[in-house]
Image: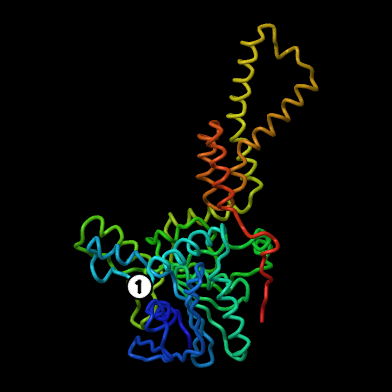
Amino acid sequence: MFTSRLALELSNKVYSHTTLNKTVVDVHYAGKKFRFFVLDKINTSQKLTGGLEALALSFENNLVFVIRGADVGIGRNVFKMISAEEKFIPSGSGPNVFKSSFQDWLWNGLLGSLGIVRLTQYDDMKIFFKKNVKQFSNHHIFIVGHSLGGEIAQRLSLDFHADTITFGAISPWWSLSHIERKKFLNNGIKDDKINNFYSTKDPFHYFPSRKLGNQNSIVLKDYTSNSTLMAMFVERIYWAHGLNFYEFNKYGEIIIMQDASKYENFFNYLNKKSIHTFWIDLFIVLSGVLPTIVMWLTVQLGIEKIFPNYALSNISISLLVGMSLLGLMSTIIYMLPTFIVHSRWKYLIWALNLTLSWTGIGWFILLIIAFILNNSYTSKNIATQNKF
């Protein structure tokens, strides 16, 4: 039987380039050995925007795809430079640390996750996945991965509706097109086969995106370190985001927290509310009315200074109606950056919108940020939904 603990151990092992070049991968826990046979592998590190490394494994009657997360790249050198404790220094790092950092952290991990560029590692993984599923069609499929690998695994699950186990995964929500997101909200795309394990102490878990599938909050071993303050800062990120400090029960399985924290529940609430936009958008319009009134009063006072004989009472009813409509349009335009965003970042953008947009340049900057957050592929780049 394929378990979440086996998925955890495999997700950890594929960070080792030695494991990625093996023909057999053994996992040991609870006094047992589980043997996985390597059926196929992929490595696109030769492509500038590539960097994908993954294995297709056979276990009993299961076909298991294991996707490596982001290579730590130059970060490993940073850990050593600030004298972090050895147990907190991540494994990995390919022969070209700068190239792997660009591929995993900048291009795919950040820009690809936000939908600013194509998530090219997913494109490569999709071809690899379809090839092996077709070849081993009688196997039950599992997809596993950690962090960036978990994001790609979840994206595959949305497209192919396969059982997926991920750890500390960045959500692929913004890498989907607008049409795909609408299809998801209308239950045309399902995330019911995704199980993600995460720590509430993991800063990557609060990456601004809609969380997909079943979210399982895990228990971590206590953090202890004698390092400097700077080293402890990066150590704690690895401690919370990595895979080496999970707590297990007496059967060797992952311990799950029964209840999410109030902080986590609050963020989940905000995420859900930001998707149902009617009442939220109504509130946004109303909140933008006051700045708009202040703006119109300022204009009115300015006109009176320039034209002493001018009086608002002399204006015709039709012109007043037109000015009211213009005021409403001004409010909508003023709050446009907030309307665009559909994640819990909406609330931060809303606060900045009220305080900065009156400057003009602040509104323009917020508008650009909002478009970046909601950017997606054009319709010609939308991948078709293939299922087996």
Q: Which percent across, then down, holds residue 338?
A: 58, 43
Q: Is residue 232 left or right of residue 100?
A: left
Name the residue at the top extreme: 309
> Within 10 angstroms of label 1, few (less than 14), some, or many (20 or more) residues?
many
* 337 is higher (above) or lower (below) than 322: below
Q: Which percent across, then down, holds residue 165?
A: 49, 75
Quarter of the rendering containing residue 173: bottom right
Q: Residue at x 54, y 42 (%)?
A: 366
Name the residue at the left extreme: 226
Q: Which percent across, then down, holds residue 172?
A: 55, 64
Q: Which quadrant of the figure contains the C terminus? A: bottom right
Q: Residue at x 53, y 81 (%)?
A: 142
Nearer-the-camera pick, 16 or 239: 16
Nearer-the-camera pick, 5 or 170: 170
* 293 is higher (above) or lower (below) than 203: above
**Local secondary structure at mark 1:** loop
* 347 is higher (above) or lower (below) than 103: above
Nearer-the-camera pick, 70 or 264: 70
Q: Residue at x 63, y 11 (%)?
A: 306
User: The disc labelled 1 sits on which kind of residue?
Assistant: Tyr
